[in-house]
C-alpha cells in the first residue's frame, strides 16, 4: 500500500494582472532508486510578467539531497510578439547536474557539472479561420557552455536546432 511520506506547499502572489510570483518547497522520501537512503528537499521560486506583446519569466530551483549536495538551477526566458504573426523567443538555462554519466565505472560518475544552455528562436503563427485554433511554424538554435571535462562526451562546442509546428487552442 502506498505511504504518504512526502509533502509539498506552494504560495503564489498576483499583485497585478501583469505580475505573478510563486515559492514552493517539498520533501520527497527517497525519490531516486540510484540514491537509496537519500531524501530530497526541493525549492522553487519564480516571477512572471506578461502584457499583450511580452511574456517573461525568471526562475530558480534547488534540490537538496539529505544527506548529500544541493544542486541548483536557474532560467530566464522571454517571448516577444513582433506582430500578431511573428514571434521571437529566447531562453537561458543554467543547471548543476551530477547525473550526466550513468556508468558507475566512469570517473565522472556522480560528479556535479554546471552547464548553461542559450536558445533563441522564431515562430510564425496564424489563426485557423474562425476556429479557436492557431497554427505555428518555427525553429530555434541552441548553444551550450560547459566545463572542458565534458568535451570527450559532449564535444568541444555542442549545439542544436529544432524545427517545429504547433497547433494551439486559443489565440
Image (tube, rainbow, N blue to C red):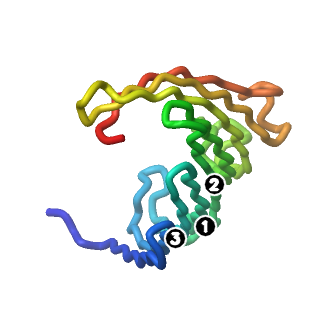
Q: Quadrant of the N terminus?
A: bottom left
Q: Is residue 74 visible?
A: yes
**Which mark is first along the chain, 1 or 2?**
1
Q: Quadrant of residue 73?
A: bottom right
Q: Is residue 152 visible?
A: no
- Left or right: residue 94 versus residue 87 is right
User: Real-space Cα distance between discs 2 and 1?
Assistant: 23 Å
**Which mark is first along the chain, 3 or 2?**
3
What residue is at 57 percent from the left and 45 percent from the top? 79
SS for tag 1? loop
Q: Position of residue 46 (x, y in %)?
A: 54, 66
Q: Quadrant of residue 69?
A: bottom right
Q: Nearer the viewer, mark 2 or mark 3?
A: 2
**Which mark is first along the chain, 1 or 3?**
3
Q: Position of residue 155 (x, y in %)?
A: 77, 25
Q: Which residue is mark 3?
A: 43
SS for tag 3? strand
- Left or right: residue 12 versus residue 131 is right
Q: Nearer the viewer, mark 3 or mark 1?
A: 3
Looking at the rendered structure, which numbered label has been put on residue 68? Answer: 1
Is 119 above or below relative to 12?
above
Q: Which residue is mark 2?
A: 75
Amino acid at each position: 500500500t502506498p505511504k504518504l511520506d512526502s509533502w509539498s506547499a506552494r504560495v503564489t502572489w498576483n499583485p497585478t494582472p501583469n505580475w505573478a510570483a510563486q515559492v514552493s518547497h517539498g520533501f520527497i522520501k527517497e525519490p531516486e532508486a540510484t540514491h537509496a537512503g537519500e531524501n530530497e528537499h526541493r525549492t522553487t521560486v519564480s516571477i512572471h510578467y506578461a502584457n499583450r506583446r511580452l511574456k517573461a519569466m525568471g526562475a530558480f530551483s534547488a534540490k537538496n539531497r539529505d544527506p548529500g549536495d544541493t544542486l541548483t538551477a536557474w532560467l530566464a526566458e522571454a517571448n516577444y510578439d513582433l506582430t500578431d504573426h511573428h514571434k521571437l523567443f529566447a531562453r537561458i538555462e543554467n543547471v548543476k547536474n551530477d547525473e550526466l554519466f550513468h556508468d558507475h565505472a566512469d570517473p565522472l560518475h556522480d560528479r556535479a557539472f554546471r552547464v548553461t544552455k542559450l536558445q533563441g528562436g522564431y515562430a510564425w503563427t496564424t489563426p485557423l479561420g474562425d476556429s479557436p485554433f492557431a497554427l505555428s511554424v518555427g525553429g530555434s538554435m541552441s548553444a551550450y557552455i560547459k566545463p572542458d571535462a565534458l568535451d570527450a562526451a559532449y564535444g568541444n562546442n555542442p549545439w542544436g536546432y529544432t524545427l517545429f509546428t504547433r497547433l494551439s487552442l486559443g489565440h
